[in-house]
Image (cartoon, helix red, strand yellow):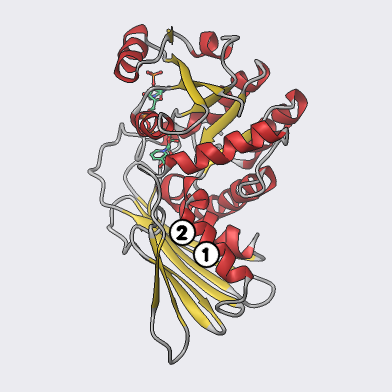
Amino acid sequence: MRTIRWGILGPGAISRKFVVDLKTVHGTDIIAVGSRSQDRATQFASEFDIPRVHASYDALADDGQVDAIYVGTPHTFHKEHTILCLRHGKHVLCEKPFAINAVEAAEMVQVAKEHRCVLMEAMMTRHLPAMVKVRELIADGAIGEVRMITAGFGFRAEFDPKSRLFDPALGAGALLDLGVYPLSLAFMLLGEPATIDARARLGETGVDEEAAVLFGYPDGALAVLTMAIRLDIPREAYILGTRGRIKIWPRWWVPSRISLKKPGGDEQILDLPFKGGGYAHEAEAFMDVIRSGRLESEVMSLDESLSIMRTMDTIRAQWGLRYPVE
Ligand SMILES: NC(=O)c1ccc[n+]([C@@H]2O[C@H](COP(=O)([O-])OP(=O)(O)OC[C@H]3O[C@@H](n4cnc5c(N)ncnc54)[C@H](OP(=O)(O)O)[C@@H]3O)[C@@H](O)[C@H]2O)c1
């Protein structure tokens, strides 16, 4: 099996978690890290035993030893950093949300295609064994036709106007940071919605602190999705079908248990643990795409990432929420 040589761009909170898991994945070599600061790059490199240290993202992207780069910077930089890496011929696994809006996402996809590099949104949830099982159960008709999805993601963060969660300059708000998970679940099971109704409470910094989104589908199915950065939303999700329902147990976006309940029957519990913190599965899926010579993942396709971004644009337009970078 060909070893994939990784570079890490932006050694922050999520990159740290990702690297802990990536180190356990067979056929990987984390050989480089790039930061805006020499000190932060050096510190990250020594913590994780990474040999090549770059004091700029350009230098990392230009590193000829690197095959693939994980982009772990705040949302507003995903486009710039992803395109930088793609232009240097690197495959890119880019953190969620894929970009700030659909225009940015389309540019990223275009450059990936031009340079024939793999590009994938790091929506880790989709690659976990429990989610693979959910897809299988639904495809096998275990709950009949899916009629409704209910899912939410929210926690009470301390208000800090300078933080990534609250600062509009960093693409803050519940939708892009957390809402993208329930939206992505609905897309995975029902595809692009035909109708979108969204309400939000915008907070002091002008971003959505709580929001509810209702998707409607041509066959009448519904997705009821909630998100918040100032409220603790219950952490299970349900998929309701004409012949039963699936519960995805807390935390549903990193699940290790699901259950199946048919009318009149007992609840059947299925335990499907994930490895480490859950990030190894998306890394394996991404590397499989690279090794196979394909250019994108079927589980998290570029069309779907684009469609999710378009939908988030529509939702924000309903709230009148635009970011300074737009
Ligand atoms: N998949 C998941 O489970 C998950 C979980 C949390 C977050 N995320 C996503 O990952 C991304 C990063 O989140 P995070 O919490 O890791 O962010 P973070 O720690 O605040 O920032 C990550 C790194 O980005 C770099 N950076 C570049 N320009 C920056 C700027 N102008 N301001 C701040 N940092 C900048 C910094 O590295 P240097 O300055 O050292 O280069 C920083 O350490 C977000 O898009 C988020 O949605 C995903």
* Total residue callouts: 2
Residue 176: percent from the left, percent from the top? 47, 45
Report whether 71 appears left or right of 118: left
| In the image, residue 280 above or below residue 313 | above
Vertical placement of 61 versus 186: above or below?
Answer: above
Residue 290, quarter of the rendered image: top right
Disc 2 C-beta below 8 A from ligand 1: no
- Inspect the image, locate mark 2, and give the three-letter code of the amino acid beneath it: Ala
* Residue position for label 2: 130
Q: x and y percent of residue 294 in the render?
A: 72, 36
Residue drawn at the location 35% of the way across and 34% of the way down: 17
Residue 284, position as x, y percentages in the image: 53, 38
- Circle 1 residues within 10 Å: few <14, some 14–19, many ≥20: many
Q: Is residue 16 left or right of residue 264?
A: left
**Towards the viewer: 200 or 253:** 253
Say which mark, if any, is on residue 212: none
> Which of the pair 39/307 is nearer the observer?
39
The residue that disc 1 covers is: 134
Image quadrant in which the C terminus is located? top right
What is the secondary structure assignment of the residue under circle 1? Answer: helix
74 versus 265 height, above or below: above
Mark 2 and mark 1 in contact? Answer it, CB < 8 Å.
yes
- Mark 2, secondary structure of its residue: helix
Query: Relative to residue 102, is residue 211 drawn left or right?
Result: left
Residue 268 visible, this orientation: yes
The quarter of the image holding the N terminus is top right
Furthest residue to the front?
A: 1
Among all residues in the image, which is located at the extreme right?
114
- Give 224 or 149, whichever is nearer the viewer: 149
